[in-house]
Image (cartoon, helix red, strand yellow):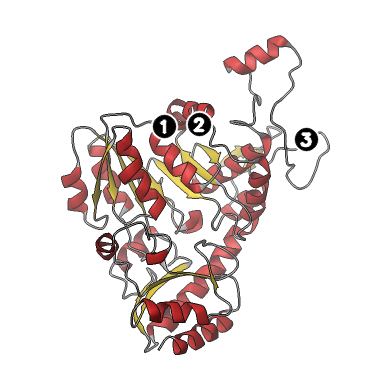
Amino acid sequence: MAREDRRGRSRIAWHKATELVHGGTLRSQFGETSEAIFLNSGYVYDSAEQAEARFKGDEEGFVYSRYSNPTVAMFEARMCALEGAEAGRGTASGMAAVAASLLCFLKAGDHVVSARALFGACRYVVEDLLPRYGIESTLVDGRNLAAWENAVRPNTKAFFFETPTNPVLELVDIEAVSKIAHKANALVVVDNVFATPMLQRPLPLGADIVCYSATKHIDGQGRCLGGVVLSSKAFIDEKFHNYFKQTGPSLSPFNAWVLLKGLETLPLRVDRHCASAAAIADFLADQPEVQRVFYPGRSDHPQHQLALKQMDGGGPMVAFEVKGDKKNAFRFMNALSIFKISNNLGDAKSLVTHPATTTHQRLSPEARAELGIFDNTIRLSIGLEDVRDLKADLDQALAAAR
């Protein structure tokens, strides 16, 4: 399929890795090789007439960096090419992306059906924030298609879920759930952060809106915050843009530049993350100190067949239960040397988290148990270190946890 480049010349469509290096590039009159950082808030017009045309939308161009900036535009274009989306907007963080993607079109009296297995802050948005504005929500077991169908009401306007889920890597069937939602004329919003855009593309599977915390694997080195919302041009233009323009959850141009640099190496990094994660999951499954391992790429994962259907790999995250209780989990974590204790993920450095006391601590013990999060549950974000060193670090830490 042919596309046009910036000079209007026809070119053959690029593969993902090439798009992530060259896609959407805007160059100034200086012809810089690396993307330029436009650290400016406003723009100068040649005439009052041109300013009027820009504000009316009759002339293309940048108006104000709260909602349009050349560096941010390059990041948005590159993410659209990667995701196969018609349009997108960069946001200040992943949570800004999630909140804006819902609030931009929901109103008082609407109803949202959401999977109950969500990142703690996402669950807050659905369970606590939306109802404050008169938007009702129902939480369901995302794995159960009948639960999605039974939760639909006449005023249901959105389905929301993440897959794989944080932290124990449950999967939601994107295609099947999207069909249920569309039968009810509801939009499907998917948080795709754990799979990364390299392993899973929700839009071709039926989703309407995809959100990312670009802070995670897209940056990949724990340097900055960022997010992105990707959808159809109609949704971005008619629903999202005005909300975004008026409320201002905008992405910093400097952070957009950092994220552009991250995108250049994303395919290489995700391949390495996934290969190491698969090896770590197999290693942990053989350890006597480990009670259970959660990894979609393993055949013993209860939804392994779904992972094969909608993902291009098992992913960069591994969860497991160490035998014992919270004390055993903490002894294990405190004994690690290479793995760093952090609630972040998607870093070049391998990270370890205790979800019950960090990312999901605001939930009651009963709610955590319903999600399969216990005091002995541990989440690993596998980095880029030599997998032999990671295994050795886990081995000595497991011995300390006995």
Helix, strand or loop at disc 3?
loop
Classify 200 as above or below 54: below
Q: Are marks 1 and 2 in contact (CB under 8 Å)?
A: yes
Residue 244 marker: 2
Q: Amino acid at mark 1?
A: Cys
Report the residue at 31% width, 50% height from top: 175
**Can you say which quadrant of the picture contains the C terminus?**
bottom left
Q: Is residue 328 left or right of residue 241?
A: left
Q: CA distance from mark 2 to mark 3?
A: 26 Å
Q: CA distance from mark 1 to mark 2?
A: 8 Å
**Can you say which quadrant of the picture contains the N terminus?**
top right
Disc 3: which residue: 28
Q: Amino acid at mark 2?
A: Phe
Q: Is residue 369 left or right of residue 119?
A: left
Return the disc, 3 or 1, that comes first in the chain's sequence. Answer: 3
Q: Is residue 17 left or right of residue 99?
A: right
Disc 1: which residue: 104
Nearer the observer, disc 2 or disc 3? 2
Classify 395 as above or below 193: below
The residue lying toward the viewer, choosing from 143 and 59, is 143
Return the disc, 1 or 2, that comes first in the chain's sequence. Answer: 1
Q: Amino acid at mark 3?
A: Ser
Rendering coords of residue 291 (x, y %): 33, 81
Nearer the observer, disc 3 or disc 1? 1
The residue lying toward the viewer, choosing from 85 and 135, is 135
Residue 49's quadrant in the figure?
top right
The residue lying toward the viewer, choosing from 108 and 215, is 108
Rendering coords of residue 165 (x, y %): 37, 59
Helix, strand or loop at disc 1?
loop
The residue lying toward the viewer, choosing from 242 and 28, is 242
Q: CA distance from mark 3 to mark 1?
A: 33 Å
